Amino acid sequence: MNEHREQSILDREVEDEQVKQRDTSILRPLDTAARLGRLMWQEFELSRMAAGWVPGVRQYEHKLQLGRFAYLHSRNMKMLYERIGELPGSLSEKEGTPAPIREAYERISQAADAYAFYIGYLFLAERQAEQYDKLLQQLDSVLDAPTVDQLRYISVHRDAVIHGLREQLELSSELGAGRENELKQWGEYVALLWVLLDQAGDTKQMESIVWPAHPTAAPAGPIPEQPLHDEENFPMYRPAPEKAGGRAYDDEEMSPLFYSVKQMHYINATEISAAQSLCYMYYGVQKMPLAFYFDLMRHTWDEFRHSEMGVRRLKELGYETKQFKFFGGGYSQDMAKEFYADMYAGLTMVAEPCSFIKKRKSAEAFWEYGDARSAVQCEFDMVDERMHVDFGKKWGPELYRQAGDLITAAAMSERARERRLGQLGVVPQEEIKRLVKSFPAFCGLSTVELNYSKY
Ligand SMILES: [Fe+2]
Ligand SMILES: [Fe+2]
């Protein structure tokens, strides 16, 4: 050992000794950063848990609610992340959630059914609220005012989630009837994991936790292989063999509005399937920068909103969702390593940019027919979609890079269009190269036009 190193070890020992004697009730900037870091990773895991259970709940409104909650956790996370960036210390962003926190939260999310999941989720959200309150009490209102501000913003959304979860459990209490023992055992398991994490204190100590056996033999979520679907109110589209794999929305069987510009609202309503696919992706993609997860969650939540606004407008116009056909989608466990990158490129480089033309023309038509509400809906839709295409250009190549494939945004976009034309199988191979460069012609093949001349 050289002299210099020996000296630095000695210095550290002296410092450690000083830390032991220090008044720890006053938080130094480094201490605050460490507390915020843990809260931030917990928010991330709550967000993954909520998104991962979207396909695990059957009712449409429950899917929307979990989508909203996943977004709120992600927003909280972003606020913490911003403040942590101003404080000293490092976050080890690349490594992601510390392994013991992820382990505990994943175990708690692996519940027997949605009802048990909500119990575990509420427990974690309430404990986290206590952590926030405790930290707020310790912070100096002048020295650490920027942190206090962030926590105050967070508390609004935090309370909304807790309130929503309590209400959810109350409204579905019949699902707990007759299984008191099982649920008591589940609640104890959840509480025990929390105690283990809490007692361990920092992540180094957490690594030595011995995890108790999981009480659920076959969890129903998160990310079930087949998403649950409310078939009664949102019947599934099952195309006749000759119609399968064709242009998107090119079947009058799907919607009583097929020959009307109001078909746009139906298309919006079906975006719940895009939202759900993005939930799988949010849960499944690992080791990306946190900015990616913030953008992806915003994108996901927007698709929930688009579906919600579509369903709302159809109902306002006197229709029931039962009259339309919706999409589901399942997910193989052993998917190719580029599965998510391909899906994301398909959505952001094909489906979303091609939808602009329809949305713009629909907005113009709705204004002409005097339907301002529908027109404005299309305008907001375009605002969101523009942002999604930008997300795609930014993160698509990054996702391919992670899968070992270096590609530029432009090449990724062309490849996604080539793949789409290949799927449709209506264009000769030599035509494909030319068509992918002509955007309107490509979109005309990929998706069906609407009948703007009929309200
Ligand atoms: Fe959308
Ligand atoms: Fe979108």
Image: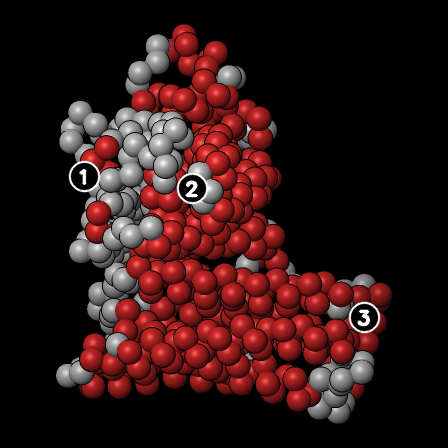
Instruction: Specify the amino acid type for callout 2.
Output: Tyr
Q: Is residue 59 left or right of residue 72?
A: left
Between disc 2 and disc 1, whose residue precedes?
Answer: 1
> Secondary structure beneath disc 1?
loop
Residue under pointer 2 = 340
Residue at x 42% of width, y 14% of height:
432
**Residue type, label 3:** Ser
Judge from the rendering whether residue 225 lies leftward or rightward of residue 436; answer left or right. left
Q: Position of residue 35 (x, y in %)?
A: 63, 76
Between label 2 and label 3, give the one nearer the viewer. Answer: 2
Q: Position of residue 17 (x, y in %)?
A: 75, 86
- Name the one closer to the observer, 380 or 436: 380
Compared with residue 176, is residue 331 higher up or lower down, i.e. above or below?
A: above
> Is residue 47 at all visible to an observer of this figure?
yes
Q: Position of residue 277 (x, y in %)?
A: 37, 47
> Do labels 2 and 3 touch, CB within 8 Å?
no
Find disc 1 in the rendering and name its residue.
238
Dot 3 falls on a residue whose secondary structure is: helix
Q: Residue 8's mark?
A: 3
Q: Is the CB of the residue bearing disc 3 within 8 angstroms of ligand 2?
A: no
Position in image of residue 214 (x %, y %):
29, 73
Q: Left or right: 45 with respect to 150? A: left
Depicted 247 relative to depicted 325: above or below? above
In the rendered image, which quarter contains the C terminus? top left
Q: Which mark is residue 248?
A: none
- Determine if the C-beta at disc 2 is less than 8 A from ligand 2: no
Residue under the point 43% across and 79% down: 163
Residue lying at the far top of the rendered structure = 430
Q: Residue at x 50, y 49 (%)?
A: 299
User: Could you tell me how far apart the alpha carbons at marks 2 and 1 are, in whole angstroms?
Assistant: 24 Å
Amino acid type, residue under disc 1 in the picture: Arg
